[in-house]
Structure formats: structure tokens, C-alpha cells
Amino acid sequence: MKAVIIEQTGGPEVLQFKTDHPVPTPKEGQLLVHNNISGVNYIDTYFRTGLYAAPKPEILGREGAGIVAAVGPNTTGFQVGDRVAWLATGGYAEYTAVPADKTVKIPDGVSDEDVMASFLSGMTVLSFAKETYSVQKGDWVLLHAAAGGAGFLMTQILKSIGAKVIGTAGGAEKCALVKSLGADVVIDYRSEEGKDWVKLVKEATGGKGVDVVYDSVGKDTWEGSLEAVKRKGTIVWFGNASGPVPPIPLPKLSPKCVKIARPTLFGYIETREEFEYYTNELFSLLKSGQLKTKIHKIYPLEDIAQVHKDLEGRKTMGKPLLKP
Ligand SMILES: NC(=O)c1ccc[n+]([C@@H]2O[C@H](COP(=O)([O-])OP(=O)(O)OC[C@H]3O[C@@H](n4cnc5c(N)ncnc54)[C@H](OP(=O)(O)O)[C@@H]3O)[C@@H](O)[C@H]2O)c1
């Protein structure tokens, strides 16, 4: 089968496209899925560079949508031919053996593409807006990288709750996209004026600061996020797009009694019940049209190095997908 393998960590050049990789055999508790479409997430670059550790050789890609091609021994709940989405590892391939307990049937009326544009990212933003910090109507929320794969969905979820959203994004086109989603204030944090985004956030909130910051940019924004949050506010650091947040001396949190969180989606969907809760919520938002998706581009599998370059080069809006 076609697959992209990495044998060592490094730049996009370590992604090797193969056409003769063996199709995996599903073990107990697993399904073999013939992927129609796979998602590319920023986390894939962390496993490629080694920021996050995983055994190599590895096939990257944390999610896929396709058809069940085989069912492993003693595995229940699925049949060959079911149209499913899964969350595991190995999406940069035509076929993936995935755990059945992290696989779900896609309801009629929802396309594979819509699911892949919102599966990992959408469950992330739904769980973070509900459990990490419970966003309330009227809250001021600062969201960085608001035009990205996760950001595009998060902006909509926050607005649907009734929050007042300040979205940051790099460049006019991305800012226009965030504005079109109903964000109350949009800041181009790469422009001359927007570089002082902390000041703009303070101005927008009458000098108080925001109730919560969702910061997935990390190294370049963490200090500003700490300044922009209000007294007794919360900061959710959940990504490393510019590099990780360094270890923070805890006394830095004292003057404003700030709460911080560093969540991961996988911590909120560990049990089958939790996984089904968020997949059901996501599918119902997609089906009703309340949540719109944005696909940056669907790339052929052999162009995977370009996808990573585009993501790390801040060239994508919405979600990049792969056609295995
Ligand atoms: N903790 C979790 O469970 C979890 C789950 C999902 C995602 N995440 C995190 O959420 C973030 C978004 O993920 P995503 O897949 O949707 O990616 P994405 O937002 O589509 O892409 C990352 C964006 O970050 C911004 N950025 C700022 N500084 C950057 C830099 N120095 N280099 C590259 N990009 C930079 C860019 O937007 P601008 O050009 O607008 O600045 C870029 O488009 C990532 O940090 C990811 O790790 C975490």
C-alpha cells in the first residue's frame, strides 16, 4: 500500500513516501480501515521533529475516515463496509489498523471531508471550552491562531456560547476569515499595530483583561497571554506552534491569582463513554449546520512534506487534509 514512513526525527525531508508498504493485519480489538481521507494536525510535526517522543519507524497521522475493510478477532460493534472515523496513529497510509474503541460510525448526511476537517480539532475545542474552562455567555475570550484548523472551529463554538471573542491571526486574509465567523475583535498579531496585541486586548476589555486565554502558539505568546488575562482569569496553554511554553515560576501567577491549564484532548476522551459523548456532539453540530468546516486544501499523500512545510510556514487557513 501507499504510506509515508519516518525512520528518524527531523525536518519535512524525513517523510518518506512508499508504494510497497505491507497492509497491516488488525489484531484483537482492532479494525482495518481503508482510509478515504486523513487529517493533518500540527501535532504530527511534533512527532516528526521529536518534540513529542514516539517509537520509530512510525507512520504519522492521528485521524482518518474511510471504510472498515476487516475486523480483528473478538472485535465487536463494527462490520466490513461500515463508514467510520478513527483517532489513533498511522493516518498517512491507505490502510490503518486502529483500535475499535477509538472508532465511530459516521452518520448519514455527514461527509468524510467534514468529519476530517473537525474530528480531532473539533473534539479538542469542544472539550476545552466545556471542561478545561467552562466558557460562559458574556465571557471575554482571547484565542490565538484563530484562523487555524482548531481556531476556525473554536471561534464558532465560542460565539455559539455567547462569548465575546478576541481572535489573533497572522495577515489580512486570515483576519478577514476570523471576522467572518463573528469574532468581536480581530488582531493581526504580525502587523506593526498588532504586535502590541496585549495593549489592544486591554483596550477592548476596558483595561480589565480577558476571562480566559486559549493559547496554542506557546513560546512567542505565553508572556503576553499572562499580561492579557484578567485578575482571577484562566490561561489554557494547549500547543507549541512557535515552540513550547518554558517552565514558569509559579509566583508569576500570584499577583493576579491566575489559573493555568495544560490539557490534551486524549485526557478527555479516554473512556468509550467520553469518546462517544464528544463524537455525538460533533456530529450533531455538523449535521445541523451549526458548525462549519474549512478545508485548507486536500493534498495527495505523496505531497505530505509540502503539507508540513505549509503548516509550519503559517500558510494554511482551516484544516489541511490528505488523500491517501
Ligand atoms: N492539546 C491538545 O490536545 C491539542 C489538540 C489539537 C491541537 N492542539 C494545538 O493547537 C494548535 C493548533 O493546531 P492545528 O493543527 O489546528 O494547527 P493550525 O492552527 O492550523 O496551525 C498552527 C498556526 O499557529 C500559528 N502560529 C503562530 N506562531 C507560529 C510559528 N512560529 N510557527 C508556525 N505557526 C505559528 C499560525 O497561525 P497564524 O499565521 O495566524 O499565526 C499557524 O497557522 C497547535 O499548537 C496544536 O498543537 C493541541
Image (tube, rainbow, N blue to C red):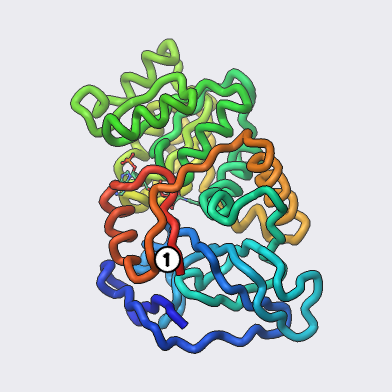
| Residue appearing at x 50%, y 63% in the figure | 38
Q: Tell me which amino acid carries mark 1.
A: Tyr
Where is residue 180? Give x, y as percent: 44, 26
- How many residues crowd around disc 1 within 10 Å: few (fewer than 14), some, or many (20 or more)? few
In the picture, residue 105 is in which quadrant? bottom right
Where is residue 93? Give x, y as percent: 47, 74
**Up/down of 144 relative to 283, above or below:** above
| Residue appearing at x 60%, y 52% in the figure | 111
* Residue 49 in sight from this viewpoint: no
Q: Mark 1 = which residue?
A: 52
| Residue appearing at x 58%, y 33% in the figure | 157
Determine the residue located farthest toward the left in the rendered image: 192
Is disc 1's CB within 8 Å of ligand 1?
no
**Nearer to us in this view, 168 or 33:** 33
Where is residue 313? Give x, y as percent: 26, 51
**Up/down of 123 relative to 61, above or below:** above
